[in-house]
Amino acid sequence: MKFFAEIIKDGFLTLKLNKMRTGLAILGIVIGIGSVIALMSIGEASKKSVQNQIQSLGANLLTISPGSQSQGMVRGAAGGRTTLTSEDASALEAKKFSAIKTVSPEYSSRTQVISSQSNTNTQVYGVTQNYQTVHKVTLSSGQFISENDLTANSKVAVLGPTVVEDLFGDSSFNPIGQSIKINGQSFQVIGVTKAKGGSGMSNQDDQIYIPLSVAQKQVFGVKYLSAISLEAISQEEMTRAMNQAGYFLLERHKITDTTKADFTIRSQADIMSAMTSVSGTLTGLLSGVAAISLIVGGIGIMNIMLVTVTERTREIGLRKALGAKKKAIIYQFLVESVILTFSGGMIGILAGILTAFVYAQLNSSLFAISVSSIFLAFFVSVAIGIVFGWYPAKRASALQPIEALRYE
Amino acid sequence: MKNIIDLKNISKIYTTEAGKTIALDNVSFNVKTGEFVAIMGPSGSGKSTLMHILGAIDIPTSGTYLLDGENVENLDDDQLADIRNRKIGFVFQAFNLLPRTTVLQNVILPMKYGNVPEENREPIAKKFLTLVGLQDRLSHTSNQISGGQQQRVAIARALVMNPAIILADEPTGNIASSQAEEVMAIFQKLNDDGHTIIMITHEPDIAQHSKRIIILKDGQIVSDQLNYQYRI
Ligand SMILES: Nc1ncnc2c1ncn2[C@@H]1O[C@H](COP(=O)(O)OP(=O)(O)O)[C@@H](O)[C@H]1O
Ligand SMILES: [Mg+2]
């Protein structure tokens, strides 16, 4: 114990005496570890933010779309698929399936919308009151489409903030009570949804909601639906909900061969995994860059350790000549390397986290720490530091003292 | 008195790209406990090489070396380190001090490897640094002092473990003659106390302090005589 206490004390002393060498070695480690942690954390944060966005589309969400499995992923033009009807939705709802909480029939199409000041082309959704719960729509003002609006065929509309900006020139404008024209028909604005900041596949801020009955009968003149969204009672019951809805619809559509189904059910998890794989590619890319920084940092550590080999070999020769045993030499160098790499490692971890944090602040994005990267970077750098601190010592301590003393 | 050093047919051959150099050619001699030997000879005659072998910091190409009765060849690395630490005080021709390290720490170093209790190290180091006249240079680093002072630090370092044998390679080579006399006085005193001293020098004046003079030439002993006129 006393032996080690002394070696550790000596280690600190030696490191202090050789400030330049110590500083450069620590710098190499800090760069290696810091950059890996920063990059991986930024990747982790972007993955998380994609996941959060998908979550915000609605939890436990199942989407039934018209069309067969094989065509499933490609959305046809509006009117191209007519296999899902409001009657399907009503029948599903009337069945009150145990795993299905809410049924939300939807018809949507892109169309021209005009206000007194401006016009725009946007996605108009014919929905029921259930849409709000299933898709977690929150309002910044006014109210959502109600059951009354549906039975009374009221010509009312709820706008997304982007639509408000496009139609009235300012997203902070309060359009409630204003009149707009959708596909030539007048609607009264009754609500505005809260900005979700969505991007990518569907920007929920650039949408208009109107009663489904009005959309089908008066605006677009169709009898079918573009989708039925279902909310399962829980994440665990998603599969059961999918089966209940699927077999029910097959029976209703008189289809016995499941491969010939004229509709497709996809879960939010499917969409999620598709999206995560996109951000996974991004993380992979960042990991690649991180791996390169780790190698660069590692070479830095290696270099500074090897550059001092000549001086250190002579030192080892002298210590041996004065009576140092092999063990004492090896421990001395190991302890020095451990002190170096651990202190460099700690600073590197802090620097990496700080960089990721500053990045998140500057981009007002999510801040997350990739814990695995901390372990990876730390252990790789520490291993490099220790191996390259220890190896020259091991080699030099095997030399005759005089050979080590003459080393150049 | 018994032989503390016993060399039999020691040869040392260096093989480099430039060719073979026979630095020591079949050298044999004994040194008894308490002797004070000077080794002389022209530059390149193999004096330092011999000294390194005597100090067990180098190994001969052939021949046997009995140190205090033990065949050095049969000792492992750690046993040799232990012998160097406790029995031998070596003064290098090139001093070999730890760079950027204080005079005091340099002199303490052998005691760290010799299990000297920590609290005793500094007083012992200071005692020997005072002996060589460096008591006011304790916290200078080894590169902040002159060559002569570095040589005296190396001498102090060789003495702190109270070794039976002192091997000094030109210990006065960088020291002004007045101080050289002081160093010789120290060696003389140590020799009087029973320490065996082997010293390389090319100065006849300095050699006169020894009781026996060995002269090397081209790696061979050409003369080995008692020095009847050694100065006390
Ligand atoms: N490490 C070495 N490699 C090759 N030749 C050496 C080495 N050390 C010494 N020599 C050669 O051995 C001979 C004796 O050297 P040395 O013992 O240093 O002589 P001295 O100390 O008497 O001046 C010289 O010719 C020298 O060039
Ligand atoms: Mg020499």
Image (cartoon, coloured by chain):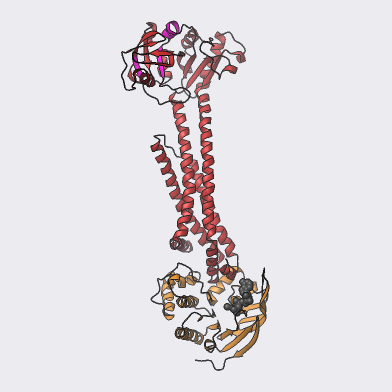
Chain colours: A red, B orange
- Left or right: A346 in relation to B170: left
> Does A350 appear in magenta?
no
Quadrant hosting residue B35: bottom right
Q: Is residue B34 above or below residue A370?
A: below
- Left or right: B102 in relation to B26: left
Question: Splitting the image into four quadrants, where does ligand 2 fall?
Answer: bottom right
- Left or right: A317 in relation to B218: left
The residue shown at (45%, 53%) is A343
Nearer the observer, B49 or A150: B49
Find residue A99 and report its horizontal and vertical position in percent.
Answer: 48, 18
Find residue A88 and report its horizontal and vertical position in percent.
Answer: 50, 9
The residue shown at (40%, 15%) is A209
The residue shown at (55%, 55%) is A387
Residue furthest toward the bottom? B229
The residue shown at (46%, 46%) is A34
Looking at the figure, which quarter contains the N terminus of chain B?
A: bottom right
Find residue B200 and report its horizontal and vertical position in percent.
Answer: 56, 82
Quadrant hosting residue A408: bottom right
Nearer the observer, A169 or A311: A169
- The magenta span reads A190-219
Find residue A150 and report its horizontal and vertical position in percent.
Answer: 39, 8
For residue B102, say whether it is visible. Answer: yes
Q: Is residue B149 above or below residue A262?
A: below
